[in-house]
Image: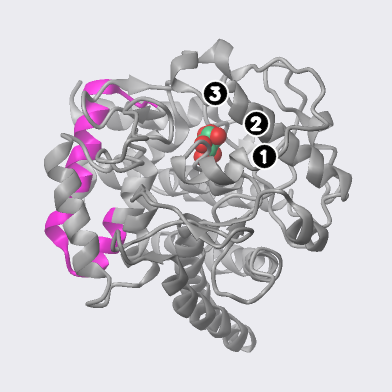
Amino acid sequence: MSQNDLDQTARDILIGNDQGGYTVPTKGLYPYQWNWDSVFVARGFATFNPDRAWREIELLFEGQWRDGMVPHILFRKDDPSYFPGPSVWGTDGGPIPSSGHSQPPVAATIVRDLLELDSSDAAAGRAKGLFPKILHWHRWYMQYRDPDGLGVVAVIHPWESGRDNLPDWDDALRAVEVKDVEPYVRKDTSHVDPEMRPHKEDYDRYLSIVAACRKVGWDPEKVARTCPFFVADPGITFILLRACRDLLALAGKLGLKEHMAEIEGWISRLESGAARLWNPDLKAHVALDLRTGKLTDGVSSASFLAPYAGLSGPDVLPAVQDHFDRIGSKVRYLMPSYDPDHPKFEHLRYWRGPVWAMVNFMISRGLSEAGDAVRAERLRADTAALIQSGGFAEYFSPETAVAAGGGSFSWTAAIWLAWATPSHAEQAA
Ligand code: GLC
């Protein structure tokens, strides 16, 4: 297929997955509105329909909880083809039935992009409408996912990280006692090859965490104190740090200066906290189990997000580049979600190895901002090659380029349009 055809297919996928203002990740496997999926989708819509791009994020924030949390799934209508649905989560925090935890906060970064890309008169007003909601969400993250002010952001569930079955969660997840889980039937394995999905023992624990949080009414303060899983994630920490910088820029641009000092405080707290995630043996940022104090022992794709977070000094950038080159000579397509030299790497099991387009987009952006145009371009070219050979799949093998998971996937289409497509690169040149 030519690149023009692929551009058109990508637009058709976004339009086809549109449910009237919000977009599902893919039909069947994921029939609701997902948090960070929607935000990347908005970035894709911004290339051909700015109004629709804003709408996507505005609809996501319609589901914001009273405490500021923006849920990872909004169950706007009941769909029995998905498990676990609203009754399992048992939440009551916001106006729309939802899951009980959040997902990576990319919204501020993409809203800043939308404002730059949209020259219409309405753009500033729409950004201003979203600003206080994003601020509230960031405040919630800083208060309840970093309750001790360490400058690292915890996830209370592997799903909150957006990188569901990452090996980094294994030890902390094993420590979760399986309890209060009613008999259940998974739906994911009927949509997609079970070989590529998380194992049953993981699923039992995913549901046990949900049950534990449900018991404390999803009160964020109680959740932070009692949740059996509380692991600082370099992915969320770096994405939030980056998003705070973009929120600060938005505050400046929109003339909302009264919020700048608070945001600056978050930025310096996260900047210094990042050192806690540094594994000196590995020379990389990893996850930190806040219940046990243990660092994990593998490089993940989030380790490469340090430059995206603005951490690209001589203590960090060369180490990131060394890992990049080592892994880049090991697999044909970057960036695998986990280190191929680690024993837990599996090239096709979801977040234990496969390449995800939107992660590449963020890593590349950080590298490019740090002045590393060559590695940034390798990521773009690899992402484009994977999509050209395998289509708009959920994820891809870094070794064989096999396309896997769900098909006609919204964020893969969006990232193609926003960044990976060679036609976009030509226009930008
Ligand atoms: C999976 C992914 C998560 C994503 C969701 C919908 O759960 O791990 O990151 O948001 O699917 O695409």
Mark 2–mark 1 Cα distance, whole angstroms, equals 7 Å
Where residue 85 appears, x then y in whole percent?
A: 75, 28
Does label 2 point to a residue whose CB lies under 8 Å from ligand 1?
Answer: no
Which residue: 61% across, 26% down?
Answer: 201
Q: Which residue lies furthest to the top in this view?
A: 190
| Dot 2 or dot 1, earlier in sequence | 2
Q: Is 114 placed left or right of 191 in the picture?
A: left
Where residue 10 appears, x then y in whole percent?
A: 36, 30
In the picture of the structure, the residue carrying the numbered disc 2 is 32
Residue 208 appears in which quarter of the rendering? top right
| Dot 1 or dot 3, earlier in sequence | 1
Q: Is 92 placed left or right of 342 in the picture?
A: right
Is 370 situated above or below 3? below
User: Which mark is in front, 1 or 3?
Assistant: 3
Mark 2–mark 3 Cα distance, whole angstroms, equals 23 Å
Badge number at residue 199? 3
* Span highlighted in magenta in the image: 364-393
Asked whether the viewer can see residue 429, the reply is no
User: Which mark is in front, 2 or 3?
Assistant: 3
Residue 207 appears in which quarter of the rendering? top right
Quarter of the picture holding the N terminus: top left
Which residue: 41% across, 44% down?
Answer: 44
In the picture of the structure, the residue carrying the numbered disc 1 is 73
| Dot 2 or dot 3, earlier in sequence | 2
> Few, some or many C-alpha atoms within 10 Å of disc 2 (few <14, some 14-19, many ≥20)?
many
The answer to the question of whether label 1 and label 3 lie on touching residues, with beta carbons closer than 8 A, is no
Q: Is 380 placed left or right of 69 in the picture?
A: left
Question: Mainly helix, strand or loop, the magenta region?
Answer: helix
